[in-house]
Image (tube, rainbow, N blue to C red):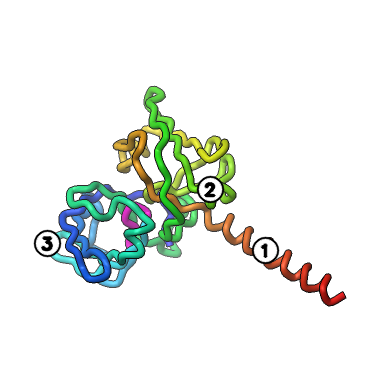
Amino acid sequence: MFTGIVEAVGEIKTASPQENGLSLRIAPGKLSLADTKVGDSIAVNGVCLTVIALADNLLSVDVSRETLQCTQGLDKPGGKVNLEKSLRLSDRLGGHLVSGHVDGVGEVREFQSLGESCLLAIRLPDSLLKYVAKKGSITVNGVSLTVNRVEDNELEINLIPHTLAETTLKGLEAGARVNVEVDMLARYVERLLVMDDKRRSERSIQT
């Protein structure tokens, strides 16, 4: 579990093909690895991955072929990635609850400077739009953000100077693809409604 508050920007140093995906070695940037051990979870551009090795101030993770097919930004040496260690129960929840399980890939439609801040507009897959609400939370490349507007199949977000300075989002441009995770609470609400409808249908059949 994560919060979507990025701790550092790292760099993919190597991406070595494996039978079922890739093995990545990542330079952690300013992220301290002093309390990190093999087996820990870390969010890389919003994707929850398991640390399999630590050496020479680099962390190694494996990425399955399935994960590569439903995410972006994990297969290019030299690529910058947002990093966050997993949440401890004693930590402050500064963003929102993030699982690190990417729901889909969105397309940046607009990235416009508005003085010190920036307007970010993203087109989402139709299957994810029902989980997005104005002033609700969404995760983009591992960053917890607030939705300002939702219209048709696009959402708009305002990126403040701190977010631009501390994450990779400042490098976005129109046409870029981003990892998106919707608010997990929306998914639980949907599940409850589906189960409630199912029970009502079953009762009506019995009567």
- Assess disc 1: are there few (<14), some (14-19) or many (≥20) residues with their C-alpha within 10 Å of its C-alpha: few
Q: Which circle's residue, 2 or 1, is located before the other in the chain?
A: 2
- Is the residue 23 above or below the residue 158 in the image? below
Image spot of residue 146 (x, y percent): 50, 41
Residue at mark 1 to residue at mark 3: CA–CA distance: 50 Å
In the image, what residue type sits under mark 1?
Val
Magenta: main secondary structure: strand
Camera sees residue 37: no
Q: Is residue 169 above or below residue 68?
A: above
Q: Which label sits in the foreground, 2 or 3?
A: 2
Q: Position of residue 149 (x, y in %)?
A: 55, 35
Q: Quadrant of residue 172?
A: top left
Instruction: Check whether the beta carbons of the residues at disc 2 and disc 1 lie within 8 A of each other.
Output: no
Please tell me which residue lies in front, 147 or 39: 147
Could you tell me how far apart the alpha carbons at marks 2 and 1 are, in whole angstroms?
19 Å
Task: State the residue position of label 1.
Answer: 194
Q: Residue at x 23, y 60 (%)?
A: 33
Q: In the drawing, what numbered circle is on residue 63?
A: none
Q: Please count the marks in the image.
A: 3
Mark toward the viewer: 2 or 1: 2
Above/below status of 26 relative to 114: below
Residue at image point 37% right, 46% down: 178
- Labels 1 and 3: the sequence-earlier one: 3
The residue carrying mark 3 is: 56
Quarter of the figure with residue 43: bottom left
